[in-house]
Image (cartoon, rainbow, N blue to C red):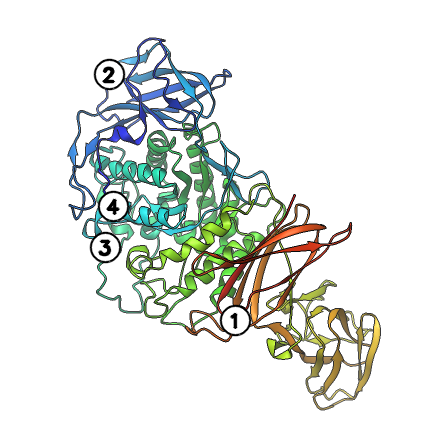
Amino acid sequence: MKRLLVALCLIAVCIGGASSSRAQSASIEQNRMVEVPLEITVNAKNPYDPAQADVQVTLTAPDGTPRTVPAFYMQPYQNACTIADCPAETLSAAGSPGWKLRFTPDALGRWQYAVRWTDADGTHEQPPAVLEVAPSTRQGMISKAANGRYFQYAGSGAAYFPVGMNLNWSWSGGGGTLAYLRWLDELRDVGANYARLVIDVPWFIDLEAGPPLGDYTAAQQDAWRLDTILRAAEADGIALQLVVLWSAPFGTTVYPPVSIPKTPARPDTRLDWATHPYNLSKGGPVGTTAAAFFSNTQARALFKQRLRYLAARWGASPAIFAWELTDQADRSAAAPGALAEWLREMTDTLRAFDKGGGSGGHLVTAGLRDLKNAAVLSSAAFDFTITRVYQRRPVDPASDQVRLTLDTLKPLLAVSDKPRPTLLTEFSLNPWFEPTADDPTGVHVRESMWAAALSGAAGSAMSAWPDTYLIPQKIVPSFRALAAFAAAVPWASANLQPIETMLYNADASAYRPLRLTAFAQKLAGDKAPDMTFKVGADTVEPALESASSFLYPQKSSLHQALRLRLSVPLDTTLTISTKRMANRGAAAILTLTLNEQPLTRVTLNSNAEPLSLTFPLKMGEHTLTLDNVGVDSVQLDAVEIGAYIPLVRTLGLADRTAGVYAGWFQHRDYTWQTKQEPPPASYRLSIPEMPPGTYRVEFWDVQDGNIAGEETVTVNGNAPGSLEVMLLPVSQMLAVRATRLP
């Protein structure tokens, strides 16, 4: 596809300046960005500094509601190159610089806009002008859904479920903006709808590209790049998350402990505080310590000015999904209090200016390097939370990518008092360079994306290394399956919650044993609260580490029985193992009950050898209780169930009122480490507590995105029951979508 990069005006409907109240073009569409050249003369040495040139526009909606947005000064550029005939863009000025207004009308009818500005000559006003807004099918800006855990388009109410990847930046040696347009086209072609872009790097887009700070004249070509990318993203149906402040220069420069491959080509991304424009040695206001950036008064004022320009020039764009204020706020050595205050102040500033796309503006978030510092983010009241996860290949041993993904998301998804959408916005096997050698076909990419999507997160996980891994290795087409699967799930309107399902097979070889050993090994200490541990195939809730391995006697202040809730898929065995008793001259009496019925009672005398007790265990739900009614303590070694973990791992979400289920299944022997397809495993899936009715069940091929099969299943009766589905054999991955028919 050839895409001509032409004058800026094509980014939106362009309306000529007005000096009277006559109505303008009736082609203005609801939820489409409008650009209005302002016919004003402003006397200011630096038109980008609102202290010298403060141009504001009051927009009045058809219902009489006003909102005031800043206008912006810009130099238009043009590029006659196409993707086919240029290695990178070559820009030239397209006319004279001037003032513009951009906004996106979110209501039908007659709008008014009135311009008021203050400069060296005083305060000036223009009479109001009028715009007529007609209906359109455009979906509008993206906001939080009413259920608080997902996203939706504010205009249509349709769900927005992000599926895509990081497109951090391009560079002149890698094709510049032209390469970015190709990448967006690749995402569009597979149905993806999200990308993440850093707009704070000197080799691509950087508003503060040249001195003096606060004067964006030298950055107008970079601003053209962002204009161009946003226009292309909107045409391709892709929403961008924009990282406003890149954290790399604020942390200690640590060189990778591995050699970076010389190919493929890549920009030199090593930035530090010594070269940052805010550093005093480079003409900035901040001394030699990067942490002072967050508390320095002049630095704060300059950064607020940058936020104002961002909101004025791009805040009306429907192609922006969210502002990411900074990617790793805690990368700096700034004191937590100063950092939290900076985040709150800048978030408030951005929201105050960002009204051109609607009264609520775009979503705002920020990231952390370490979730242990989550309190830093609390004061800013971000719209959604984000996290990141990188294995350290090839330095560290390989880890289970799905388990790592779920464990990373878990603390954010567990917040119950004020639930917010959560996204995993960065992941890879390698934090230093592309993991081509470890995973040339991108199995870990599919693992992470599907695991995140079915975990309760508000979108898929977003892979790193686009131009050096995902695109050249032809991994992007694997996004198609999740994008198509997610398109028919009612994320915004349903009450989808993580759900425990069971996989049944009468053959014990379809299961692996479960061995519980992760008890706290410390003797004495504080008594844990009474709880029942729910034992799943992959997790124990609460974490088993909160249970002591010691069963203290009843007279001890630390006495506590161990209760385990088990879901056993077929008849098997239960084995309880103890460690050697201490030589204390007293006996412990171990009691086991199953579903409140006595199973055994064993006296363990002082210095007794380790004990192993095995019992038959029937299929079904059980509560196992281990207690000690003796005098001395006894230490557990393990609790083992002979057949418990199915060969196929499953994650699922369900709305048990509406009758909606979405699930993902992965053979445990098909991972990025194994790189081999194991023999298929077959199971009957049982989804509990679904409302009665007839369901259409779709089986999705996760590799190519096709529906591999369909069937109709019924939950009989008048009360909720189990939806029973015979899965297609699973040798790699499979997805299932079930919807109750009207």
Q: Nearer the viewer, residue 307 or 714?
A: 714
Q: Residue 223: horizontal and vertical position, in percent?
A: 26, 36
Q: Tag 2: Cα neighbours inside 10 Å, few (<14), some, or many (≥20)?
A: few
44 versus 679 height, above or below: above
Q: Which residue carries the number 1 mark? A: 668
Secondary structure state at the residue bearing disc 3:
loop
* Mark 3 and mark 2: Cα distance apart in space: 41 Å
Q: Tag 1: Cα neighbours inside 10 Å, few (<14), some, or many (≥20)?
A: some
- Name the disc covering residue 47, or none: none
Q: Nearer the viewer, residue 308 or 232?
A: 232
Is the residue under label 3 in contact with that under label 4 (CB below 8 Å)? yes
| Front label number (2 vs 4) | 4
Task: Please state which amino acid type lies under the numbered disc 2.
Answer: Thr
Secondary structure state at the residue bearing disc 4:
loop
Q: Residue 732: horizontal and vertical position, in percent?
A: 48, 68
Residue at (24% x, 32% y) in the render: 215
Q: Earlier in the sequence, mark 1 or mark 3?
A: 3
Residue at (42% x, 53% y) in the render: 480
- Name the disc covering residue 41, or none: 2
Residue at (45% x, 47% y) in the render: 162
Q: Earlier in the sequence, mark 4 or mark 1?
A: 4
Is 159 displayed left or right of 48 in the figure? right
Q: Earlier in the sequence, mark 2 or mark 1?
A: 2
Hey, which quadrant is residue 510 in on the image? bottom right
Q: Earlier in the sequence, mark 3 or mark 2?
A: 2
Hey, which quadrant is residue 37 in on the image? top left
Q: Residue 458: horizontal and vertical position, in percent?
A: 51, 48
Secondary structure state at the residue bearing disc 1:
loop
Is the residue under label 4 in contact with that under label 2 (CB below 8 Å)? no
* Mark 2 and mark 4: Cα distance apart in space: 31 Å
